[in-house]
Amino acid sequence: MKKNLGFRAWFYFRQGWSTYFAFILAALNTMVVTYYLAIEKAPTLKYIFPSFITYIAVWMMIGIPLLIGIGYIHFKKSAAYASEADIGTESNPYVYKLQPGHATLVVFPMYLLLTTLLVKLSKNEKLTEEEISQIEEIQKNLKILIAGGYIGKPSFQK
């Protein structure tokens, strides 16, 4: 970790700058510029926003809920965040990620079948035809995944 101290400091600097410092300055800059260059020069807008404080108050009452809604849509209702997360995961060599649907269609059913097998083996019972069929289906899906294929659809495409 000590050999990467410079890169770690650079990463923390960029996070602090972009998440906090630049964000706050950009918001203030936008409000100041729009008020003093646009609103102050237009008599109708000056009547609606008689002072900079009034403008900020209205902007916050409308802007903050609007931006929260846009952020919610970005994370929950569009494919944008899923794409960002995929890119971050692909570029991170320390993370292994199952594609959406794989855990419920392959991995967890396989765990369930393995535990069923263990219980049956411990009781000296034989597998039913249905259980053998399930195992073969999971084996087929695992071969698809190992070959780089996909099982199911990402949650944002439902």
Image (spheres, helix red, strand yellow):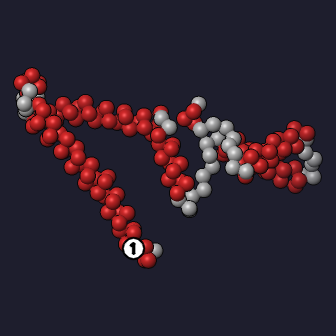
Counting from the top left corner in percent of width and height, residue 127 is at 90, 45
Q: Amino acid at mark 1?
A: Leu
How many numbered marks have been drawn onto this rendered protein structure? 1
Residue at 39 percent of width and 69 percent of height: 7
Counting from the top left corner in percent of width and height, residue 28 is at 18, 44
Residue at 57 percent of width and 36 percent of height: 155
For label 1, count other residues whose C-alpha is less than 10 Å away and answer few (under 14), some (14-19) or many (20+): few
Q: Is residue 154 above or below residue 43?
A: below
Q: Quadrant of residue 33?
A: top left
* 19 to the left or right of 115: left
Q: Is residue 63 above or below residue 92?
A: above
Toward the top, the furthest residue is 44
Under circle 1, the secondary element is helix
Counting from the top left corner in percent of width and height, residue 20 is at 28, 53
Nearer to the camera, 141 or 111? 141
Nearer to the camera, 5 or 33? 33
* 79 to the left or right of 44: right
Asked if residue 48 can be seen in this view, the reply is yes
* 109 to the left or right of 51: right
Toward the bottom, the furthest residue is 3
Residue at 88 percent of width and 53 percent of height: 121
Counting from the top left corner in percent of width and height, residue 11 is at 37, 63
Asked if residue 108 can be seen in this view, the reply is no
| Quadrant in which the C terminus is drawn | top right
* 62 to the left or right of 44: right
Residue under label 1: 5
Q: Is residue 73 above or below residue 113?
A: above
